[in-house]
Structure formats: C-alpha cells, structure tokens
Amino acid sequence: MRSRNAKRKPTPTPPDHADDGWARAKDPTPGVCRVPRFQPLFEALRALKRDDERENHCHHPPHSHRHGDLHPPTLPPSVNTVHIALFEDVSNAQAIRKRLIQAATTEGEEGDRLKAEVDFGFLEGRMLVSKSHLLTAIQTTLLNALTPAVVPSSAGSASGSGSSTPNPNPTPALAQTPPQLLTRSHNIHSELLLTLSPNNNITESIRRHGLSDQTTSLVVVRMGPGPTYAEAQEGPDGRGRGQEQNVDSRQSVWKEMEEVVKGRLVELDQLDREDHPDWARVDKVYKLAEMNQLKLPGLRQRKIDAVINAVAIKSVT
Amino acid sequence: MTSTYVPPSHRLIQQSELIKQGAEATYRHPHLDLSLTRTRLSFEARALARAQRAGVSVPKVLWVDPAQGLLGLEKVEGWSVREILGGGAEGEVEAHEGEEEGEEEIEGGHGAEGSLQGGAVVEDEAVESEGMQKLKQLGVNQEHLMKSIGAALAGLHLTTIIHGDLTTSNMMVRLTPGSSEPYEVVLIDFGLSSTAQYAENYAVDLYVLERAFASTHPASERLYAGVLEAYSHGLGEKKWQPIEQKLKEVEDS
C-alpha cells in the first residue's frame, strides 16, 4: 500500500506528525479533519491472515469470517470517509435542534432534502473526555455497523459437517451478508450516539451525548462516501482521482457544516484539554464515581481510559 | 492466541496497537469454534475493562471485532517481569553469572561480600537486565518490585477476576514518569481469565505464579514470599485467611 502521506499536499505540520495518517486541523480547509479510511487497520489484519492463506485458498467477500482472507476495500465506499469538526461558543444550538426535529418529522421529498442538510452526527462536546474517546467511538460504530449480525441459530444446522472435502465457505450465514450498514437506530450518525452511551437506550443516548439547547461545545461528524480503495490507489504516486475527491469532499462537507452551525471552529486537540469535559456529568453517565475513591496516581488518565474501554467493548456488553 | 504488533504509523488512533486473534482449533467444528472464540474474546475484553475500572493497570481495549475473533489492545511499553529478573534462556543466565563473578574476583574485595550475602545477591547483580538497571536508577529494588506485583494481584483479585495464566511473562513493568510512583506493574493476557467463586480459585492463581517463579528465576522463594506478603496485605486479613488455607492445601498435595 502506498503511504497516505504521498497523497496529501505538503502542509506545514511538524515532522513528527507527518506520517501518522491524520489530516490536521491546519490543513488547507480550516478545521475540518479528514480521518483516513481504515486501511492501516485492515492492512495489519491482512498481514495476520497471510499464514492462513497458504493453507486455505477460499475467497470470501470482505467482512466474512476469519477463515477467509480479508481483501480490500474493507470499508464500503458509502462510509469510508469521516469528517470531524469541533465548534466552540456555539450560539444556535436551539435552532439546530429545531431543524433536526423538523427534518425528522417532515415526509416526502421535502423531508429528504431537510434530512440531507443536517445529515451529521451532533455530539455534545463536554461529554467527550479526549480526542481518542471520539475516535474510538467512531471506529467502534463503523466496526459494529459493518460486522454482520451474529447468526448462532444456523450453527446447529449441519451445513459444514461434511469435512471430507474442504469447505470453501465455513460460515455461509456470515459470508453472504452484504456489506451494508446494520444499525439499531435510524442511521449511522445516531448509532454513534448509541455507541457513546454505556447502555442501549436510544432516547437516553441522544439526551446525554447529543445536542441540547444548552450546548456550546459541539462536535459535528459526517461518516460518508469517499473514493473507493481502487480510486485512492489510482495514478502515479497514488495521486489519482481519489486525491481530488478527498479535497472536494472536505470543502463541500465544510460548506454544509458551516451552513448549519454558528460557532467558532477550533482544533480537535482541544478535546484533550483538562478543563474541556464536564466531569460531573461524565462521572454520572459512565458511572465513574467509584473510581474517584481510588487512591491511585493518574486518576484523570485512568478515568479517560475507563471511558474509552467502555466505548470500545460496546459490542460485547 | 496470535498477537500481531501494529507499529504507530499503521494505526487509526494514535496508539501502538496489538491485535490479538483467538486461537483457532481446526479440529473443532467451525461453528463451535466460532462461538467459543467469541465467548472468550468478549470475556477477555470485559475483564480488562472491569479490572481497569478497579484501578488495576491493564492494557486499554481499543476495539473488539467479535465476528472475526479479533481484539485490538494497547501495546504496553516496557519490560516483562521475566526480562527484568533476567529469566531469559537458562543457559545464558549461568554463563553471564560465571563471567561476572570472575570479574568481581579480579577487582578484588567483593568476593567476601558476595559469600556473606548469599548466592542470590550475586546472581541478581550478575544478570542485571536493561529494565532492572532503569528501575535501579529510579531507586527501585527487587523487593519493591515484588511488593508492587503483590499489590497488583491483590487489586485484581479484589475484583473477583482471576487471571488464569499468571507468569512473570504476563506482567509488565511500565515506567510512569511524572507520576508519584516511578513505575507500575501492568497485568497482560487475560485470555484465560475467569471469575472466581471460591477461595480455591484465587489460591490456584497464586500457585501457578509460584511455579512460574520457581521454574524461571533463581532465588524464587525469597521473591515469591515478597509477592505474597504484599498480596495478603493488599487483600486484607479477612479475605486472605481462607486463601492462605487453600494455598497450603494446594502446596501440600
């Protein structure tokens, strides 16, 4: 895989950040960070698979069980690009909320248009304890939404019991699942709120982690389409159509965000500031009161880690 | 279990990552294997989260992919306790030992001191690892390390989680600059962990560790005694007593 580094325009970012795969807030389009597609993660997984491949030459579509190999692209083009922006001093939280409600309640073509305008994840900034909290939530949301539902019911059927011939498809129920998003809530953006929530109550997750009338610190997330894996690799130095599309999408998404949110765009790293989160509320939602009793060094970091753990293990709780 | 290290440049979240794949048993029916792997994986992830909340230092969980039986964990930077105590290849240890002892004799004067304090001390100095050197620079000796291990185990057992595979390789020492303590003991690999029901479960956990100490480290009795002392202290008299009882039973049998 070509390094993503080569595909990005040279920016005045410090050299130690140059190859970490993150577009920085200082990129040409101010403030809108583009999260790289998840290639690195899955690249590593493919490396893990290589040994299996030698013995097992079956070919499954992506997202199939680990008996097969993992082929790119692993994130379907419909959600392989994530844009994130952090706004401070947001003055129109109430108006955004009204717009969201109106969009949700309007039907027909008009409703679709309104929905498209506010097709973002709106997160209460003070409920995020660090940047990695947000990123873990996004990663977990996509991973869970793309993971085919577990189908234990078919486990009893004797589909794969004939072991005399190598079974090319040991888990048919999983392998046939198309790579579409499986969400428990309305869409992938509300699913993000649900991932952030320590329980599975959708209404509660919106109330706690979503936009409220009092919100002044707001994170806006768009998980959307981007260039396909092949397009991103196209051309010399990987500067194919993918690169142009990335720039295009950054500018157009920023325009859409700007149109909805009235606030001051700041760097995402502001989330890591010690006084940024509303710890009283975080403690309550993530049930961290007990941790406050711990007589241990580095309590703040421990609490941040506990919150990240809670989000990361969401699919198995 | 297979673990794959993902270097910093190959990760989504800026964090060194270790990808763990559940052991795949080809002799099992794939469906059964799949569900077993999932169950274990989710238990491991939950156990890590629970231990972390209770203040036990364990690797952070970064993501869980139950469908593929994969677990993304934080890579713990540091040394395993095994490395620190110099329990590498046994032969290597002895070779070093001989060399160093010889040097001391040439320098003169140290021979008597060595024999006074017993062989163990000479061995410690002889095979001093990179990690131990670092710890010594920070004013931490082996006894202190054993205490920290005991305290970490007590902390874990207080959550009713038992590790299931306690060896000196499954404990890491991570330096914590800027904190009140210079280092912390991080327990890793919860792949065989479970929830304890009886005092015996805890005792078995400790017994496994004792065997691990005995088989990999010289002067293990002294080291292990230090661990146990801190452990009992951390657990409290009331909880320690039944475990002590069981431990004796296990050892005698």
Image (tube, coloured by chain):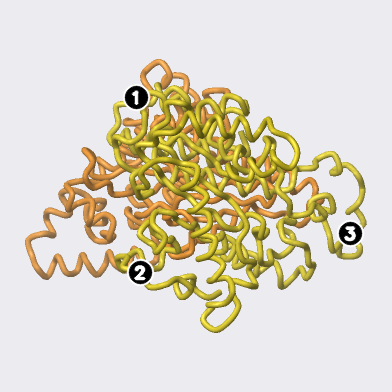
For mark 1, does the 10 Å Cα neighbourhood hold few (<14), some (14 to 19), or many (20 or more) residues?
A: few
User: Which is nearer the eye, B190 or B111?
Assistant: B190
Q: Amino acid at mark 3?
A: Ser
Residue depicted at x 48% and y 64%: B10
Q: Is residue B204 at all visible to an observer of this figure?
A: no
Q: Where's residue B46, x and y in %?
A: 56, 36
Q: Nearer the viewer, mark 1 or mark 3?
A: 1
Q: Secondary structure at mark 3?
A: loop
Q: Which residue is mark 2?
A: A11
Q: Where's residue A41, x and y in %?
A: 55, 60
Q: Where's residue A301, x and y in %?
A: 34, 38
Q: Secondary structure at mark 1?
A: helix
Sequence-wise, the earlier of marks 1 and 3 is 3
Q: Which residue is mark 1?
A: A292
Determine contact: label 1, label 3, CB under 8 Å.
no
Q: Nearer the viewer, mark 1 or mark 2?
A: 2
Q: Which residue is mark 3?
A: A163
- Image disc number at residue B150: none
Q: Amino acid at mark 1?
A: Asn
Classify B196 as above or below B168.
above
Which chain is orange in the rendering?
B
Q: Amino acid at mark 2?
A: Thr
Which chain is yellow in the rendering?
A
Classify B211 as above or below A127.
below
Residue depicted at x 69% and y 42%: A112
Same subunit, tags 1 and 2: yes
B183 sits to left or right of A305: left
